[in-house]
Image (cartoon, rainbow, N blue to C red):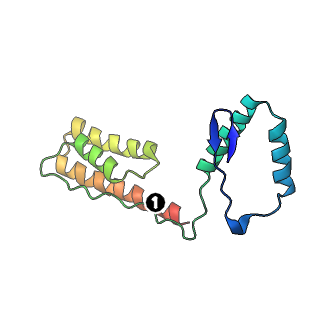
Amino acid sequence: MFESGKRAVDVQIPMGKRKALTSTQETLLALFERLPEAQRETLLSFAEFLARQSVPPSAEPTPPAEPRAIARPEKESVIAAIKRLNATYFMLEDRAGLLNETSALMTQHVMQGRDIGEVIDELEVVFGRFYEEWRAEQSS
């Protein structure tokens, strides 16, 4: 148990891992011991932050996220369809490209009177295409 200021840090080293310190560890310990108490606290906080941020490498790559299955309601507005498709394809990162195509379809519906069912069908195709492109990027 190491006591630093107001908190105690329990350092547990497994039996098989106990050994003499490396030169890097010795240097770190020597520097730590030379620091005033407030800076020791800062160093410990930073080390804890780094330890929380480190992610052990995975043996297998994680598969790309799959779309959420959200059923299309019988009566749906174009805006509601866009919201549903955004939630379905939550993993898509190219929102600018999606916005460009979805706004064009929305304009066709609102300004030109294009059938709502056709627009929503096409929106689903657009989102599906963006998902397939994203998935291809993830696997390469």
Q: Where is residue 120 in the image (x, y as percent from the top left)?
A: 23, 50
Instruction: Name the foreground residue: 136 vs 110.
Output: 136
Quadrant of the rendered image containing residue 2:
top right
Identify the residue at image location x=64%, y=41%.
8
| Residue 43 placement (x, y as % from top left) | 72, 38
Crowdedness near tag 1: few (<14), some (14–19) or many (≥20) residues, C-alpha within 10 Å? few
Front residue of 130/111: it is: 130
Question: Quick check: 81 above or below 61?
Answer: above
Judge left or right: residue 21 versus residue 111.
Answer: right
Q: Residue at x 58, y 70 (%)?
A: 59
Between 119 and 130, the one nearer to me in the picture: 130
Identify the residue at horizontal 71%, vertical 69% (top origin).
16
The residue positioned 25% from the left and 40% from the top of the image is 79
Which quarter of the rendered picture does the C terminus lie within? Answer: bottom right
Q: Which image quadrant is residue 66 in?
A: bottom left
- Residue type at mark 1: give it: Glu
Where does residue 20 sit, x and y in percent of width and height? 83, 61
In screen coordinates, is 78 left or right of 101?
Answer: left
Residue 47 vertical placement versus 41 (above, below): below
Which residue is identified by label 1?
133
Residue that sits furthest to the left in the current view? 74
Helix, strand or loop at disc 1? helix
Total numbered circles: 1
Give coordinates of residue 129: x percent, y percent.
Answer: 38, 58
* Side of 47 relative to 88 (left or right): right
Considering only vertical position in the picture, is 41 above or below 115?
A: above
